[in-house]
Image (cartoon, rainbow, N blue to C red):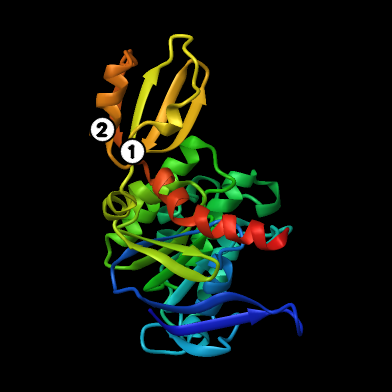
Amino acid sequence: MVFTGAVKTFGGPGQRVRAVDGIGLTVGRGETVALLGRNGAGKSTAISLLLGLNEPDAGSVRVLGLAPAQAVRAGLVGAMLQDGRPIPRVSVRELVAFVASTYPRPLPVAEALALACVTEYADRRIDKLSGGQIQRVRFAVALAGNPELIVLDEPTAALDVEGRHAFWESMRAYARRGNTVLFSTHYLEEADENADRIVVLDRGRIVADGSGDAIKSAAGHSQVSFDLAARPTEGLDLLPGVVTVEVTGDRAVLHTDDSDATVVELARLGLVRGLQVSRASLEAAFLSLTAPAASRAEKESV
């Protein structure tokens, strides 16, 4: 999968917006890649280009050496998108079997059902299933063509905690076969736990690309938290190294680019009750990477 200088613009004269702005990205076979970004960052547009649902205005997108639409028709790409309503009066097995029949080398229906963990209700009508069950059916449909690349857009949005764990177990089983997975999600912990590589988009451009650990390290911030013990919070943002301050109840969390200096000053002030120092979370790194651009956009709109 290769994006080469891909550009996609929407809107009329004077209101043109580059949803994808010159993306260059290569994903190798067998990688599991998470695509992260705020709403409007360009994730959905990038996915639409990858699936051949839109054409780039400039640059190119290739999937397994083919144009995206060709790769999809050949069954090399499967997709699980957010949109779509359940088909009435059709069982899960019937739907998966029908979709499989449209591809040249489909996955056996029973295998697709098992991988998606829907075997137990395979003979039930789709319009009688819960939202979480329907989401798993979408995964089975995406697997039906036996794709080498599967694209998942917010795949666990309708699932409860147990369902999310079951889904990722299924996805990892699919990836272990040597297949490629690209997924977008707003659950950053899912990206951190399940992706080999994370790509962060902001305003149509790639602002970070690497492992979860690499992105967290590049953000350069650590977290220093401690109990306030009813002490005032004024001046915490002025401590050495502190970038931002969060206060929840009687506990403060300082995001700092020099945790040693921050801790030394807290000790001098006698603020070391319940002290904890940890590396920045993926959420903190994500906010650090995307917040400056978001702030600029807000200023421009005023």
Residue shown at 48% from the left, 46% from the top: 187
| Crowdedness near tag 1: few (<14), some (14–19) or many (≥20) residues, C-alpha within 10 Å | some
In which quarter of the view is residue 38 placed?
Answer: bottom right
Is residue 228 depicted above or below 287 in this figure?
above
Q: State the quadrant of the C terminus.
A: bottom right
Is residue 234 depicted above or below 177 in this figure?
above
Residue type, label 1? Gly
Q: CA distance from mark 1 to mark 2?
A: 7 Å
Q: Does the residue at mark 1 contact the one at mark 2 (Cβ under 8 Å)?
A: yes
Q: Which residue is mark 1?
A: 241
Considering the numbered disc 2 on the image, is that residue within a helix, a strand or a loop? helix
Is residue 138 depicted above or below 268 in this figure?
below
Taking 90 as reference, is 274 left or right? left
Closest to the observer, 4 or 253: 253
Residue type, label 2? Ala
Residue 191 in the image: state x and y as whole percent.
Answer: 40, 51
User: Is there any visible trace of residue 83 in the rendered image?
Assistant: no
Closest to the observer, 236 or 139: 236
| Mark 1 / mark 2, whichever is N-terminal | 1
Question: Which mark, by number, is residue 261?
Answer: 2
